Image: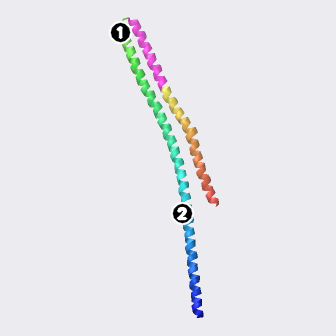
């Protein structure tokens, strides 16, 4: 009778031990899921920052290409108009001295318009470099400093 009571008590104690172990397992799984969700959220925030930075870079590149392409298109239209105008003057002018003056004016006009469009493209590139340095460079530094701060904070704990 005493051995039956002792065996029953030991079995009850073993089942209680298994119950506590199972409860601890459930708590650890819950904590692991919470930790994993925080890790995924942090990774998503970092990835979002990277994608935002990439989007800013792409928009800046698109803007630079648009201005450059627009300047080229305007330059081609400008050349077509000036070629037509000076060609008509050369074709229908009866005075040779006037033709010579028009040809000099055309050469001056073409040279100055080429310089203007070259300046527009150069200024566009300079503004792109400046924006890249000021805006994108600061965003990259901010992202890198956040990464370092988080990395240092996790080493301390």
Classify 10 Å Cα crowding around label 1: few (below 14), some (14-19), many (20 and above): few
Residue displayed at 38% across by 6% down: 96
Q: Quadrant of residue 71?
A: top left
Does residue 123 belong to the magenta stretch? no
The residue beneath circle 2 is 33
Does residue 96 belong to the magenta stretch? yes
In the rendered view, would you say 24 is above or below 153?
below
Name, please, the residue furthest toward the top. 95
The mark closer to the camera, 2 or 1, is 2
Residue displayed at 42% across by 21% down: 78
Coordinates of residue 31 in the picture (x, y in percent): 57, 65
Question: Which quadrant, please, contains the C terminus?
Answer: bottom right
The residue beneath circle 1 is 92
Instruction: Name which of mark 2 and mark 1 comes first in the sequence.
Output: 2
Coordinates of residue 35 in the picture (x, y in percent): 56, 61
Q: Secondary structure at mark 1?
A: helix
Tell me the number on the disc at residue 103.
none
Q: Quadrant of residue 84?
A: top left
Magenta highlight: main SS: helix
Coordinates of residue 138 in the picture (x, y in percent): 59, 42
Coordinates of residue 104 in the picture (x, y in percent): 43, 13
Residue displayed at 60% across by 50% down: 146
Image mark count: 2
Q: Which residues are magenta?
A: 95-117
């Amino acid at each position: 009778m005493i051995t039956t009571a002792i065996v029953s008590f030991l079995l009850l104690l073993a089942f209680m031990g298994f119950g506590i172990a199972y409860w601890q397992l459930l708590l650890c799984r819950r904590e692991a899921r919470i930790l994993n969700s925080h890790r995924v959220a942090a990774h998503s925030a970092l990835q979002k920052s990277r994608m935002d930075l990439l989007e800013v870079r792409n928009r800046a590149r698109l803007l630079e290409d648009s201005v450059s392409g627009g300047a080229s298109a305007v330059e081609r239209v400008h050349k077509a108009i000036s070629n037509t105008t000076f060609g008509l003057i050369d074709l229908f002018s009866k005075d040779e001295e006037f033709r010579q003056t028009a040809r000099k004016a055309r050469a001056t006009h073409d040279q100055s318009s080429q310089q203007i469009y070259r300046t527009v493209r150069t200024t566009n590139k300079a503004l792109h470099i400046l924006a890249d340095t000021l805006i994108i460079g600061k965003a990259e530094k901010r992202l890198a400093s956040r990464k370092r701060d988080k990395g240092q904070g996790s080493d301390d704990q």
